[in-house]
Amino acid sequence: MGDSTRQRAFIVKSTTTIELKHQYKKKNGNRSSNNAFFLSLDGTNYRVCKLFFMVTQNVGNRTIRTTLKKGGYNKEYVEGELRGNRGKQKKLSPDIVTLVTNHIN
């Protein structure tokens, strides 16, 4: 996929959290809930393993973890891409550029 926001939205749509009947974890542990991955074919969803999902979508484990961490668990929104959005940087005037170029040459 070309657009990372659309890719993240597809990952969120294809993932659901699973609450286990018996989960043995400590009271203040860091364990989170498990995820189930689904791929649709002809309108029916088929549950697939994580490895098959990653290979089919050509994404890594880190991409899935980041997507689910950035609002994917509640399925309300997917955070957009924040890389490169720093605002306008100060530009040098053409006069200064020519002065520096002449000084170097």
Image: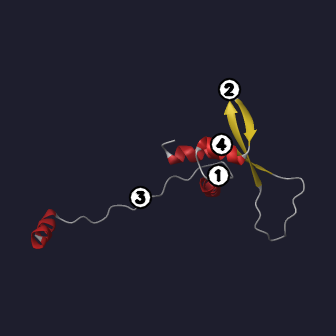
Give, as a three-letter code, the residue at label 3: Gly
- The numbered mark at residue 13 is 4
Q: Secondary structure at mark 3?
A: loop
Q: Distance between the Cα atoms at labels 4 and 1?
A: 9 Å
Q: Nearer the viewer, mark 2 or mark 3?
A: 2
Figure quadrant of residue 52:
top right
Q: Secondary structure at mark 4?
A: helix
Residue 58 picture location, percent across and down: 58, 45
Q: Mark 1 highlights which residue?
A: 72
Query: In the image, is 85 to the left or to the right of 33?
Result: left
- Which residue is located at x 58 percent, y 50 percent? 78
Give, as a three-letter code, the residue at label 4: Lys
Figure quadrant of residue 97:
bottom left
Q: Residues within 10 Å of mark 3 (few under 14, many from 20)?
A: few
Residue 100 picture location, percent across and down: 14, 71
Residue contact at pointers 3 and 4, CB within 8 angstroms: no
- The numbered mark at residue 84 is 3
Q: Residues within 10 Å of mark 2 (few under 14, many from 20)?
A: few
Residue contact at pointers 4 and 1, CB within 8 angstroms: no
Q: Along the polypeptide, which appears first: circle 2 or circle 3?
A: 2
Q: Is residue 19 above or below residue 14?
A: below
